[in-house]
Image (tube, helix red, strand yellow):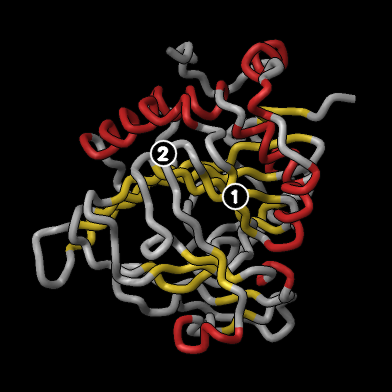
Amino acid sequence: MPVRVPSMAVFSASSLLKFTRGCSRCLVTTQEINAFQDKGAICLRGVFRDWVENLKRGIAANHKNPSEMSEWLQSEDSETFYFNDFFNWRKIPEFEEFVFKSPAAEIAGKLMKSEFSVFYHEHVFTKDPGADRATPWHHDQAYYPVDGWKNCSFWLPVTSVTKESCIKFVSGSHKWGKWFIPIKFGSLANYEGDILEDDDKAFEKAPDIHAESEKYKILSWDLQPGDCIAFHMLTLHGAKQSVDAAGRQVVATRWLGEDATFSTRPWVTSPPFTGGLKPGECFHTSDTFPIVWRAKC
């Protein structure tokens, strides 16, 4: 059983050392690091196997006590739902334990080639059996008030996922130098906002990857509980209207490196938490976004 971490707003350096002290599961290979940097999405096998039951309990707790930012999107032809919610780790002990006791922070730090790993937030996605909600093609960083290259997300299912229904990633798309307008999952409409001509990001409509899939190298995997997909926040990804027979339950966690700074967007960002930061300030300077792992000197 993992040790429960007491809920607290700020973690001391000595506490973080205790939480992140050596673990053989934390190591990732040079090949995996290079693949993450090059492709923008990789599959890591079995690294969170010991955390599956913990995360299942966390998802159940989230369902029972969702935040005001949660969504329950009903399928058109059935009483099935797509659920998502985020930034609940301070009130759900199982998620807090995962953040500070699992190897996630160290793996993220090494994949990012970062001096340290800052925890940004967790995000729960579940689909009932038979739910037919598609995931539109998008990349995550345009939704977030985050600038900087060093970032990493883990998409960690606690249910089996077939390659057919797995979320799909466009290999190398994080290096295109493009920023795409976020899409609302409920209506599939683009976010609206005033994009300034002198803005350093020329936001454009995301391409329909399904319509011209032969042009791209698409990455997806068969996944078992404990496997995860690690991906860059600028990597395009999406999924068709399909889900495995038993449904799907996923916990995603988001991690930032030392170059991540708070930024504004032409729309309301998600999550809407600023941690008291002003544009240009580093996320690791706010207690809202704790440093969980540091590289050894």
**Quarter of the image where one finds residue 235:** bottom right
Pick the front one: 190 or 135: 135
Q: Position of residue 293 (x, y in %)?
A: 70, 28
User: Label 2 to label 1, Cα distance in Å?
Assistant: 15 Å
Q: In the image shown, does 77 or 227 lie closer to the viewer?
A: 227
Residue type at mark 2? Pro
Residue at left offset 67%, top offset 29%: 26
Three-letter residue code for mark 1:
Ala
Label 2: how many Cα within 10 Å (few below 14, some 14–19, many 20+): many
Badge 1, how many Cα within 10 Å: few under 14, some, many 20+? many
Dot 2 or dot 1, earlier in sequence? 2
Q: Tell me the quarter of the image containing the N terminus.
A: top left
Q: Quadrant of residue 288?
A: top right
Q: Position of residue 87 (x, y in %)?
A: 44, 41
Residue 96 visible at all: no
Residue 14: numbered disc: none
Q: Is residue 246 above or below residue 208?
A: above
The reply to whether discs 2 and 1 touch (Cβ–Cβ < 8 Å) is no
Residue appearing at x 61%, y 28% in the figure: 103
Give me the residue at 71% from left, 77% from top: 199
Q: Is residue 211 left or right of residue 64?
A: right
Q: Secondary structure at mark 2?
A: loop
Circle number at residue 225: 2
Q: Residue furthest right?
A: 297
- Residue that numbered label 1 is attached to: 230
Residue 276's place in the image compared with 266, above or below, is above
Q: Nearer the viewer, residue 31 or 172?
A: 31
Q: SS for tag 1?
A: strand
Residue 17: x %, y % from top left: 70, 15
Q: Position of residue 266 (x, y in %)?
A: 56, 72
